[in-house]
Image (cartoon, rainbow, N blue to C red):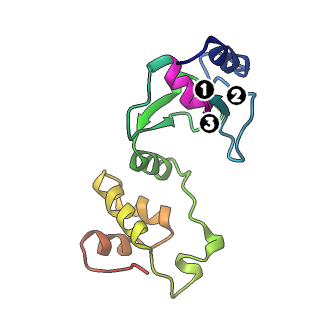
Amino acid sequence: MRWPSQIQRFWSKVITKTNCCWLWSGRKTSSGYGRLMWDGREIGAHQISWIIHNGPIPHGLWILHKCDNPSCTNPDHLFAGTHSDNMKDAIVKGRFKFNRKRKFGEDNASHKLSKEQVNEIKILVGNGLTHQHVANGFGVHQSTVTRIVNGEKRTMG
């Protein structure tokens, strides 16, 4: 059960409530996502906003930002989606950055994509992303994505 004090604590940390983003002033992760204790566990401030305005988060879904502002708690800027929806959104909007510190792709000529990456590529293309968008997100050539989708190339490590 949600205690009124939980809701009051949530609202005390929302510093701007307009038609634009509602900014979070409480504790944040290094990525800028607001965090707060809720029903005995710490969760995202945007998730709490979803719960207050829409009820429980549907099983298996994430709460995503339309505005791409991790500290936003405006319920009009939030939507429920899958991990794949989140990846697709990140790639389309240019937020997905391949981790070059781990020397993948062109930085390491002998590198092969992991099984998880190959599966994610197939899911993203299956959800309507172009081969070029997916290739850009994973730091590989478009032809690599095409060969993976067509089953012509096994690029797992």
Do the residues bearing badges 2 and 1 touch, measured as CB atoms within 8 Å?
A: yes
Q: Is residue 6 above or below residue 115?
A: above
Can residue 28 be seen from the camera position used here? yes
Q: Give, as a three-letter code, the residue at label 1.
A: Thr
Q: Image point 74% across, 35% down: which residue?
A: 27
Q: Image point 49% across, 37% down: which residue?
A: 64
SS at circle 2 = loop
- Quickly name the residue at label 1: 73
Alpha carbons under labels 3 and 1: distance apart: 9 Å
Give the class, few, some or many, for how many residues have Cα within 10 Å of label 1's Cα (few <14, many ≥20).
many
Which is nearer the eye, 33 or 6?
6
- Quickly name the residue at label 2: 24
Q: Is residue 155 magenta?
A: no
Q: Main secondary structure of the magenta part?
A: helix
Label ID, residue 69: 3
When asked about the image quadrant of residue 4, the answer is: top right
Which residue of the protein is positioned furthest toward the bottom in this rendering? 110
Which stretch appears magenta?
40-52
